[in-house]
């Protein structure tokens, strides 16, 4: 009888051979894409666990938030995790590389903590975003408050050191129910729109600036159990479009402005999770023709979630791609991104060759849509579990984050910021 050591050696050899085939297949699928980690979070002042993607300014610099890391404080109590408050950061081009700068370390308590959404630029050039907790008002979940909307402004005087904090202003504190993890959006008049949810139900809201501060208006209230994870977007007619998950199988809705209020319309309901997927966590985007694109995190024809299109006007469902997986919800959890050629880009949370998430591209063609796996995360120094959108610069380079992996003081790695160059 052969020894256990021999059998272990054979198993190890087969595993390495299988790994080689996976790497070769990935290299072919990636079509010579080059993957680079441009920042590895440490869990210190730079932050940890970025649960959102990035935004880019006109100069090509990147901005984001990390949900943990930063200041350690009892004012940042969070269930089952360390009491670190989170950060906002910038990655600035420095020659052929990148220079990372923490912009703000959240303080917790009335200041807010646990930022988990992409920030947005206002018409004034300032940054705006939300935190899931803090604020100091009563809350269904957290003793320190249900979250805030914040503004970040660069310092008035030029910094004399490499690290120079921006100035934060809390423009709104939530009471009872806090913001979801989706980004805010501005209208042309300077009002902010977003989604909130919790024990008291979910709703779409706007925030209007005035001499006495910002005032919240609830535009549409959803049944308890619905989740509006990734905000709303404006279409060309000024309607607000979004996706909801949680109650039922999920679907896509629209709010149209009518006089002094907003009217709710149901554009699409998922009725067949085996064909259409389950839980559209990633929100929606639109093309120039008004077609809506979204994704689901699970189920679908191959078990791992879907990417879909709703045709403008008729809102007929078109399946563009079905991810393959036997995990529960491995698919996209953030919004898709479309380039000028109509290609769609996104990330999955647990798909890919190593079940640690991947970056993908879906391209239109005369024979349907073509799927390309651009990169598979391994869970090592490259990162793992991207809960991130994809940002594209003028040269076609892609950028995003991973919530784990990399290095740092975190148990499973503190996350990374990555770049893929064509």
Image (spheres, helix red, strand yellow):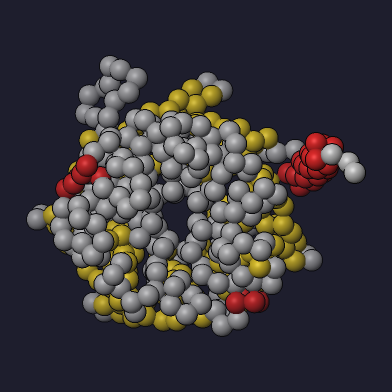
Closer to us: 389 or 414? 414
Task: Determine whether 144 is above or below 399 in the image.
Answer: below
Rendered location of residue 186, percent (x, y): 33, 57
Q: Residue at x 22, y 42 (%)?
A: 74
Closer to us: 396 or 378? 378
Rendered location of residue 381, percent (x, y): 58, 33
Instruction: Answer left or right for 118 relative to 217.
Output: right
Rendered location of residue 308, percent (x, y): 61, 68
Rendered location of residue 162, percent (x, y): 34, 19
Question: For the view shown, which residue lies furthest in the front direction?
Answer: 1
Quarter of the image where the N terminus is located: top right
Q: Residue at x 51, y 32 (%)?
A: 407
Task: Determine whether 277 is above or below 39 in the image.
Answer: below
Closer to us: 282 or 304? 304
Residue 183 visible within the image: yes
Instruction: Answer left or right for 238 relative to 138.
Output: right
Quarter of the image where the C terminus is located: top right
Task: Determine whether 201 is above or below 210 in the image.
Answer: below
């Amino acid at each position: 009888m052969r020894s256990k050591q021999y059998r272990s050696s054979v198993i190890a050899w087969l595993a390495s051979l299988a790994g080689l085939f996976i790497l070769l297949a990935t290299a072919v699928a990636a079509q010579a894409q080059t993957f680079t980690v441009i920042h590895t979070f440490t869990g210190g002042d730079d932050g940890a666990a970025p649960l959102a993607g990035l935004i880019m300014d006109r100069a090509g610099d990147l901005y984001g938030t990390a949900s943990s890391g930063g200041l350690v404080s009892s004012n940042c109590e969070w269930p089952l995790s360390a009491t670190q408050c989170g950060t906002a950061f910038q990655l600035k081009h420095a020659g052929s590389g990148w220079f990372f700068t923490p912009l703000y370390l959240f303080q917790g308590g009335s200041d807010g903590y646990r930022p988990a959404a992409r920030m947005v630029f206002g018409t004034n050039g300032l940054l705006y975003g939300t935190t899931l907790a803090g604020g100091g008002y009563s809350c269904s979940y957290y003793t320190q408050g249900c979250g805030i909307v914040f503004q970040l402004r660069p310092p008035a005087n030029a910094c004399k050191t490499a690290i120079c904090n921006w100035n934060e202003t809390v423009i709104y504190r939530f009471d009872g129910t806090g913001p979801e993890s989706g980004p805010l959006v501005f209208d042309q008049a300077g009002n902010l729109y977003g989604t909130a949810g919790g024990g008291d139900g979910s709703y779409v809201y706007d925030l209007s600036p005035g001499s006495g501060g910002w005032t919240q208006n609830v535009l549409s209230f959803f049944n308890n159990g619905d989740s509006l994870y990734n905000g709303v977007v404006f279409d060309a007619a000024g309607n607000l479009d979004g996706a909801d998950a949680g109650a039922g199988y999920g679907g896509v809705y629209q709010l149209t402005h009518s006089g002094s209020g907003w009217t709710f319309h149901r554009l699409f309901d998922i009725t067949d999770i085996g064909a259409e997927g389950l839980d559209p966590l990633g929100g929606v985007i639109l093309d120039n023709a008004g077609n809506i694109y979204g994704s689901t995190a699970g189920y679908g024809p191959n078990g791992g979630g879907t990417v879909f299109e709703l045709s403008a006007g008729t809102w007929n469902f078109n399946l563009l791609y079905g991810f393959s997986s036997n995990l529960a919800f491995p698919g996209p959890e953030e919004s898709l991104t479309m380039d000028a050629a109509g290609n769609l880009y996104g990330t999955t949370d647990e798909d890919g060759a190593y079940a640690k998430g991947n970056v993908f591209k879906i391209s239109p063609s005369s024979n349907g849509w073509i799927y390309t796996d651009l990169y598979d995360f391994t869970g090592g120094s490259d990162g793992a579990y991207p809960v991130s959108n994809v940002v594209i610069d003028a040269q076609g380079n892609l950028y995003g984050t991973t919530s784990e992996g990399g290095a740092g003081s975190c148990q499973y790695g503190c996350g990374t910021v990555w770049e893929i160059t064509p």
